[in-house]
Amino acid sequence: MTDQSPAPNTTDAPPVRRGKKLNVNAIIAVVLILAGLGVLLYPVLATQWNNYQQSRAAEAYSQLEKGVPPEILNKAWEEAQQYNANLGDIDPGDAWTSSDDESSPAYQRYLKYLSVLNDTEAMGRIVLPSIKSDLPIFHGTSDRVLARGVGHLYGTDLPVGAPGELGEDGSVPPAPPEGRLSALSAHTGLQNATLWDNLDQIEKGDPVYVAAAGEKLKYEVRDIEVVTPDKTSLLRRTPNKDLLTLITCTPYGINTHRLIITAERVPMDPQEESVFDGQGTTWQWWMWAILATAAIIVLLLIRWWWKNFRKKKGEEEPATPGAEGAQGATDTDTES
């Protein structure tokens, strides 16, 4: 008789979790990738949020304006016209390389003009439909102002156009002999706001709309120039012309020159007031590039997770104890 030692019972041994370490590493990798995606997407989200806030500020100006009694708006309009009439020769400096003495009595008086809305600091609103820009206008061109919207260049005419009433046919009043010129500035290339990044896409003939003190004005682009910061002659009045000048830095991200767009006032059809209803969301090329990159990363992450986690999980499923016992009994019977 031959003694046969009983075969070791392996059916009760717990299954080996070979994928446990892999799972922990995979989770860490996924968390790091998602954190990287958050960093990648932050500029897009921050820019769109600030754009939304600036657009809301512009629309809020018009809404608040509707609640002001007409006599107050008319007074503000007339005072702004008187300010322009008393301004004298215009010779402003560059909005970015020169600074104004904001504590001076003259500047403090300037801040009171067109400040008819208690719930906002904006003096007006400017809409550029061709580039979907809708921004509030503030007094001065300080860093604080230019981070929030469009700044009015102190020393130039307030953005109320030439004095006088519209003609019966809708024609604009003639400019006074000395002319009128209001200069407005905004940033290009801020990391967290679009502002006038797309101003270089403006073309001759494009319309520009301004709202201030209950009035709405239309201008049409006449000239586009790129100049050095010291060339400020384009910011002076032209006799018998009612002009609006838009200024921003160029080239994008370098800012060694100034893009100066000059527009002249033209009649405005009442139906065109719909441009003040909002211009929607602006998407720039770099935003689409980041979103496309993020989408590719997400797709690759899903594919990697499926290939290295889901499949391995299926392969490492332990056999059921009943099935292993049945297999062992079969093997014993065969040997007998």
Image (tube, rainbow, N blue to C red):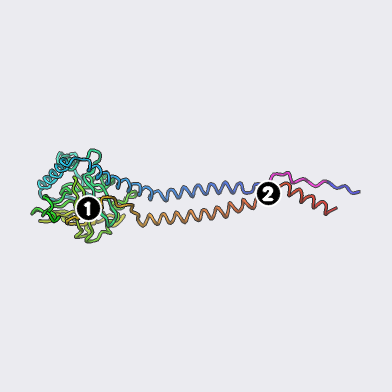
Residue 287 included in the magenta stretch of the image: no
Q: Which of 136 and 105 lies nearest the eye of the viewer?
A: 136
Q: Which of 239 and 187 lies nearest the eye of the viewer?
A: 239
* Magenta residues, dominant SS class: loop
What span is in magenta?
A: 6-15
Q: Residue at x 74, y 49 (%)?
A: 324
Residues at discs 2 and 1 in contact (Cβ within 8 Å):
no
Q: How far apart in space, not on screen, are marks 2 and 1 (Cα)?
A: 72 Å
Residue 7 included in the magenta stretch of the image: yes
Q: Which of 13 and 137 lies nearest the eye of the viewer?
A: 137
Q: Quadrant of residue 139?
A: top left
Percent coordinates x, y for residue 244 in the rendering = 18, 53
Q: Dot 1: few (<14), some (14–19), or many (≥20) neighbours within 10 Å?
A: many
Q: Residue 209 bears which disc, if any?
A: 1
Label 1 is placed on what type of residue?
Tyr
Q: Residue at x 44, y 54 (%)?
A: 294
On the rendered structure, is 271 left or right of 238? right
Q: Earlier in the sequence, mark 2 or mark 1?
A: 1
Label 2 is placed on what type of residue?
Pro
Q: How many marks?
A: 2
Task: Name the residue tied to disc 2.
Answer: 318
On the rendered structure, is 145 left or right of 267? right
Percent coordinates x, y for residue 133 in the rendering = 28, 53
SS at mark 2 in the image:
loop
Percent coordinates x, y for residue 178 in the rendering = 9, 53
